[in-house]
Image (cartoon, helix red, strand yellow):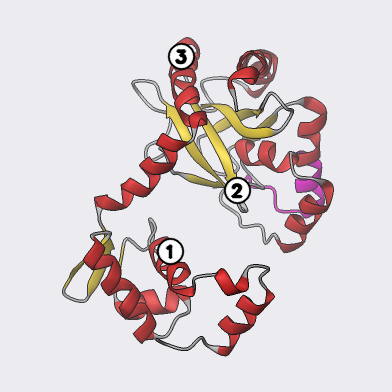
Amino acid sequence: MSRLRPQDAEKRARRANGADFSEALARGLAVIDAFDRQQRQMTLSDVARAVDLPRATARRALATLVELGYVENEGRLFRLTPRILKLAIAYLSSDPVPGVLQPLCERICREVGASCSVAVRDGDECVMIARAVPARPASVGLGLGYRLPLFCSALGRVLASAMPDPELDAYLVRLKPVRFTRQTVLAKPEIRRLILDVRRKGYALADQEAEVGIRSLAVPLIRFDGKVVAAINIGVQPEQVPAKVMIAQHAPFLMREAAALKERLV
């Protein structure tokens, strides 16, 4: 059995459940997580560098994932296989929230004629768990599992607004805003204001901040006990619907839909 590197041993010692924490499993998941749109296939050296592991450790993790069918290799290159979707399906099947929300997204999409998505928070990002688009979608490439930053997306700001103040403060301290478009807000005081505005207004509007050509309005989905469990949005191309119209029409519409759903979210 390989020994932990000193820095890994220190991290485990700091964990409350350090003795039960599986470094091998964590490394395997880190390897899976290293593959994304920018790095769809990588060499062993690329993987080791991406997850900050020795080559020998990365090689064992990759060999295990290849044997289990989650990764395939061709020559020096490794890539994820469709089998990885079983992990996502396990979540979508076991959590009742996506099952309830996908039909809602489809109905709203038909009624409004615009894309409708639901996202949940995952760390400093939000991830889409339900989505419907018109016959001619406003954006190509967005789908289940797509991730957006919390600080500059409407869905993300809604989810960030549900953080307790100390957690929100800690998030903003570690946040390093990245400019995704010319309209991305980068000043932390303004980001804080926009997030806190959601608590007062009940919605967030992000106008081409996370992606060029997408104007998005989102509201929280609140569970029966008052906890925000997700956010739902309507996304349009800017030339389709003015921001004032989205605020006047889409915001109250989404709020009513969210209120009607409250008792079904468990």
Q: Are marks 3 and 2 in contact (CB under 8 Å)?
A: no
> Can you tell which mark lies on residue 29?
1
- Mark 1 or 2, nearer chain start: 1
Hey, which residue is sitting farthest front in the picture?
A: 19
Residue 80 found in image quarter: bottom left
Q: Residue at x 79, y 47 (%)?
A: 192
Asked if residue 191 is among those painted magenta in the image, a careful observer would answer yes
Give the class, few, some or many, for how many residues have Cα within 10 Å of label 1's Cα (few <14, many ≥20): some
Q: Are marks 1 and 3 in contact (CB under 8 Å)?
A: no
Marks 3 and 2, Cα distance to the nearest angstrom?
33 Å
Please state which of residues 230 and 114 is positioned toward the viewer in this rendering.
230
Q: Amino acid at mark 1?
A: Leu
Q: Residue at x 63, y 13 (%)?
A: 260
Q: Kindly state the secondary structure of the residue where label 1 is placed.
A: helix
Badge count: 3
Q: Residue at x 45, y 81 (%)?
A: 53
> Can you tell which mark lies on residue 229?
none
Residue 203 found in image quarter: top right
Give the residue pinned by disc 2. Answer: 182
Marks 1 and 3, Cα distance to the nearest angstrom?
36 Å
Q: Kindly state the secondary structure of the residue where label 3 is placed.
A: helix
Where residue 132 appears, as percent x and y from the top left, is 42, 25
- Mark 3 or 2, nearer chain start: 3
Q: Which residues are magenta?
A: 182-194
Q: Kindly state the secondary structure of the residue where label 2 is placed.
A: loop
Give the residue pinned by disc 3. Answer: 107
Q: Is residue 187 left or right of residue 90?
A: right
Q: Quadrant of the C terminus?
A: top right
- Mark 1 or 3, nearer chain start: 1
